[in-house]
Image (cartoon, helix red, strand yellow):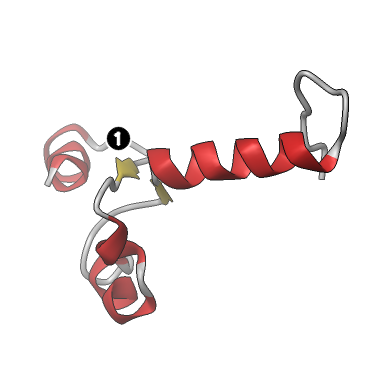
Amino acid sequence: VACQVAHSLFKVPTKIARIREQNYLEPIWADLFSRDHMPIDVIISPETEVARAIWRGLQIPGAFDSIPLA
């Protein structure tokens, strides 16, 4: 809803939606967040991002942090 308001009222060029409910990230709901239905440019999930950060940390033993460059 916030992305729709940002798009319609304020003409924000890039809209980022934070989706916390993991069920909405499943392929069955992909059409809901398509550009035809909702003006969302990027979808992020805090839980997914934390899991990716932990996974990256486990891939490089002894590292405190890693920054993907690709």
Instruction: Give the x, y percent position of residue 67.
Output: 77, 29
In the rendered image, the vertical position of residue 44 relative to residue 38, given as above or below: above
Instruction: Give the x, y percent position of residue 57.
Output: 74, 34
Instruction: Give the x, y percent position of residue 12.
Output: 30, 35
Residue at the far top in the pictured view: 64
Instruction: Give the x, y percent position of residue 2.
Output: 15, 39
Residue at the far bottom in the pictured view: 28
The answer to which quarter of the image holds residue 54 is: top right
Residue 34 located left or right of residue 51: left
> What residue is rendered at 78% in x and 37% in y?
68
Tag 1, which secondary structure?
Answer: loop
Q: Which of 6 and 55 is in front in this view?
A: 55
How many dots with numbers?
Answer: 1
> What residue is rendered at 27% in x and 46% in y?
20
The answer to which quarter of the image holds residue 38 is: bottom left
Pointer 1 local density, CA inside 10 Å: few below 14, some 14–19, many at least 20: few
Q: Which of 63 and 12 is in front in this view?
A: 63
Rendered-image quadrant of the C terminus: top right
Q: Which of 15 and 32 is in front in this view?
A: 32
> What residue is rendered at 32% in x and 53% in y?
40
Look at mark 1 in the image and give the residue it sits on.
12
- Specify the amino acid type for callout 1: Val
> What residue is rendered at 35% in x and 63% in y?
25
In the rendered image, the vertical position of residue 48 relative to residue 36, given as above or below: above
Residue 31 located left or right of residue 41: left
